[in-house]
Amino acid sequence: MKRPPPKCGPNDHTIVGPALAPASLERAAQLFRAMADAPRLRLLDLLKARELCVTEIAAALNDKLSTVSQRLRVLRQEGLVARRRDGNHLYYSLADRHVADLILNALEHARELDAAPAQPPQDVDD
């Protein structure tokens, strides 16, 4: 069935808010790429409760120290986790409340999608 043409033109609407800076959009995309790996997201979720040393993280995730260190390096480079040294121990925590909110919102949205009955795809133009 053929869809009717849109009833509005490009000049019929006002822009909602200022345009986002391309650099800001690229930076946000980098953050999402760093979190777009299930094991790294699991690690971030683990850190939302409290700061942990690398050994605790590896034990909780049942992973090798080297694997956890690699994941933490990526997350730290993107500013998603912070670290502090206490003697021979390196402790990691989420960088700030924004990171915790991103994780909570993403996981909650995923749970809602999993719980919802399958919906047919909808066109953006509706």
Image (tube, grey):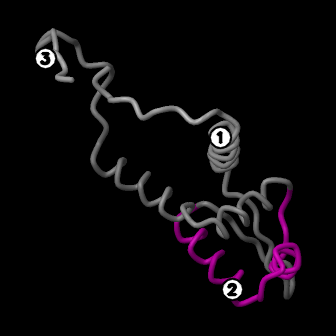
Q: Are marks 1 and 2 in contact (CB under 8 Å)?
A: no
Picture quadrant where residue 109 is located: top right
Residue at 86% over, 84% down: 87
Residue pointed to by mark 1: 105
Magenta stretch in the rendered image: 50-79
Q: Which mark is residue 5?
A: 3
Q: In this rendering, which labeled residue sits more in front, label 3 or label 2? A: 3
Amino acid type at image mark 2: Thr
Picture quadrant where residue 116 is located: top right
Q: In this rendering, which labeled residue sits more in front, label 3 or label 1? A: 3
Residue pointed to by mark 2: 67
Amino acid type at image mark 1: Asn
Q: CA distance from mark 3 to mark 2?
A: 53 Å
Earlier in the chain: of badge 3 and badge 1, it is 3
Report the front residue among 59 and 97. 59
Is residue 110 covered in magenta? Answer: no
Q: Which mark is residue 31?
A: none
Picture quadrant where residue 126 is located: top left
Report the front residue among 6 and 64. 6
Q: CA distance from mark 3 to mark 1?
A: 36 Å
Residue at 66% over, 62% down: 41
x and y percent of residue 35 in the render? 57, 61
Q: In the rendered picture of this protein, how many numbered marks are placed on residues?
A: 3
